[in-house]
Amino acid sequence: MTREVATFAAGCFWGVELEFGKLPGVITTRVGYTGGHLDHPTYEKVCEDTTGHAEAVELEFDPAQISFQDLVEKFWGMHDPTTRHRQGPDVGSQYRSAIFYHDETQKILAESALKEVDSSGRWANPVVTEIVPAATFWPAEEYHQKYLQKRGIDISCH
């Protein structure tokens, strides 16, 4: 089986992980921090909004079962990509909307999808999602991994 990696930020990582984890073809998910300047960030540090990191979900998927484009479409549907540094009640750059691409193909597909969704009229405001190269992904503390599932919660805020 071929495996690929994708990384998305769409607000609080608990709900994002839950939504992606339900998709056939998604093999594994893990929540963490990426896109910032601090090595080995902690949840507390990221919440101070000084590390530059986003709360993100890194997932491993089987491209024979689900495409990167399908994952991007799910991403658009699980959050509001028009709010800069905010999702619902969560405010700060750690809650920004971002696609962290792992190769040139992902970059091209993400940029194309952004243009398409931005011009579709789906949202009243412009899409502000960042499309940036994947950087070091720092896994969040164990208690954050599969947080909602561990608590028997099958509905996310996304």
Image (cartoon, helix red, strand yellow):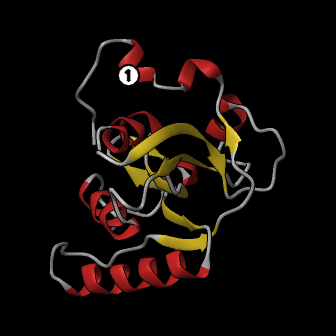
x and y percentages locating residue 28 in the rendered image: 49, 38
Q: Residue furthest front?
A: 1
Would you say 114 lies left or right of 44 here? left
Tag 1's secondary structure? helix
Quadrant where the C terminus is found in the figure: top left
Q: Is residue 127 above or below residue 40?
A: below
Residue 69 vertical placement versus 58 (above, below): below
In the rendered image, residue 15, in percent from the top left (x then y), is placed at 36, 36
Q: Position of residue 106 (x, y in %)?
A: 51, 75
Q: Outermost residue, top direction?
A: 151
Going by the image, does 13 lie left or right of 148?
right
Residue 133: x, y in percent? Answer: 65, 71
Q: Quadrant of residue 139?
A: top right
At x 27%, y 36%, the residue is 157
Quadrant in which residue 66 is drawn: bottom left
23 up-or-down from 42: above or below = below
Total tally of numbered discs in the picture: 1
Q: Amino acid at mark 1?
A: Leu
Q: Along the horizontal axis of the image, is 21 left or right of 54?
A: left
Of residues 88 and 25, the one nearer the viewer is 25
Identified at 53% across, 74% down, the residue is 131
Residue at the image point whose x is 72% and y is 61% from the top: 135
Q: Residue at label 1?
A: 148
